[in-house]
Image (cartoon, grey):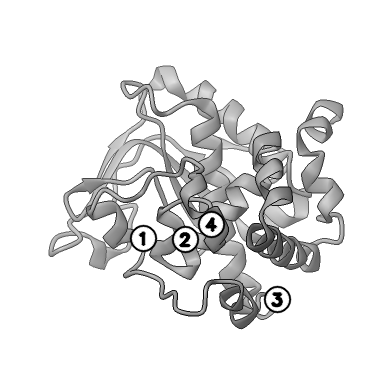
């Protein structure tokens, strides 16, 4: 186990007991996990340190107890890159899969941590306002799990969905996943994302709604903070 000095978050790389809720084992969910190799541990610590730097220490300390850094995990017979329960986050680093870049793994952190924050500060998030941005006849799908099972979980920005107010097809799986995808892009510091924000009305409205949510958690989370995220990290 490794403990982050700044945030006091516990990071586990191996395990002997069950790490998921009991009801996830067996049955339809049939949770499985494979521990991270020792060679990858320093890499994950560095990735998480960069992710932590993008939040005020207190936000992490009060809302995240532990992280399980795994090589692989499977639910419903299919691999998942990340998930979360209460104040615990699970994140994968499959060193044998070139898709698991540093950027992708950090994105999983922001994606999953946004779910924890949305649960904890639910009164700060207005679901009605968010859904009002979507086209009038739009209905979300059956959730992220269903999308993953059906191979519809790509997190790559997709211009086919911008005019409807979505960044990816996966965003349409549920309101939760829609928020998650916006969150990981807000924290990415990617100028391509901000170009999409500036060029698409619905994307811009959702971005501002989510920024407003984060700003209620900590006033430093304003639009300028997110737009200059890359510069901010360098200066820290």
- Separation (CA) of disc 2 from disc 1: 6 Å
Crowd rating for badge 1 (residues with CA inside 10 Å; few <14, some 14–19, many 20+): many
159 shown above or below 146: above
Residue at 84%, 56% (x, y): give it: 222
Do tag 4 and tag 1 residues touch (Cβ < 8 Å)?
Answer: yes
What number is the disc on residue 124?
A: 3
What number is the disc on residue 43?
A: none
Residue 163 percent coordinates (x, y): 56, 58
Residue 215 picture quarter: bottom right
- Separation (CA) of disc 1 from disc 3: 23 Å
Q: Earlier in the sequence, mark 3 or mark 4?
A: 3
Please tell me whether mark 2 or mark 3 is closer to you in this view. 2
Q: Secondary structure at mark 3?
A: helix
Which residue, given by chain and number where applicable, does mark 2 sit on? 177
Please tell me which residue lies in front, 52 or 66: 52
Residue 115 percent coordinates (x, y): 53, 62
């Amino acid at each position: 186990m490794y403990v982050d000095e700044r945030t006091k978050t516990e990071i586990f790389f191996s395990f002997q007991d069950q790490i998921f809720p009991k009801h996830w084992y067996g049955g339809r969910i049939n949770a499985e996990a494979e521990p991270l190799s020792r060679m990858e541990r320093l890499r994950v610590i560095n990735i998480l340190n960069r992710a932590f730097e993008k939040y005020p220490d207190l936000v992490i300390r009060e809302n995240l107890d532990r992280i399980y850094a795994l090589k692989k995990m499977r639910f419903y017979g299919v691999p998942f890159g990340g998930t979360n329960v209460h104040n615990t986050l699970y994140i994968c680093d499959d060193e044998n899969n070139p898709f698991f870049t540093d950027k992708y793994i950090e994105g999983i952190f922001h994606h999953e941590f946004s779910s924890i924050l949305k649960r904890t500060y639910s009164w700060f998030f207005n679901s009605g306002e968010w859904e009002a941005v979507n086209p009038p006849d739009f209905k979300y799908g059956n959730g992220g799990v269903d999308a993953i099972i059906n191979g519809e979980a790509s997190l790559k920005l997709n211009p086919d969905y911008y005019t409807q107010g979505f960044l990816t097809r996966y965003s349409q799986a549920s309101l939760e996943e829609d928020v998650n995808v916006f969150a990981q892009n807000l924290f990415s510091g990617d100028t391509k994302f901000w170009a999409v924000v500036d060029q698409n009305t619905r994307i811009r409205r959702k971005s501002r709604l989510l920024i407003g949510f984060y700003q209620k958690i900590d006033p430093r989370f304003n639009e300028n903070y997110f737009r200059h995220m890359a510069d901010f990290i360098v200066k820290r």
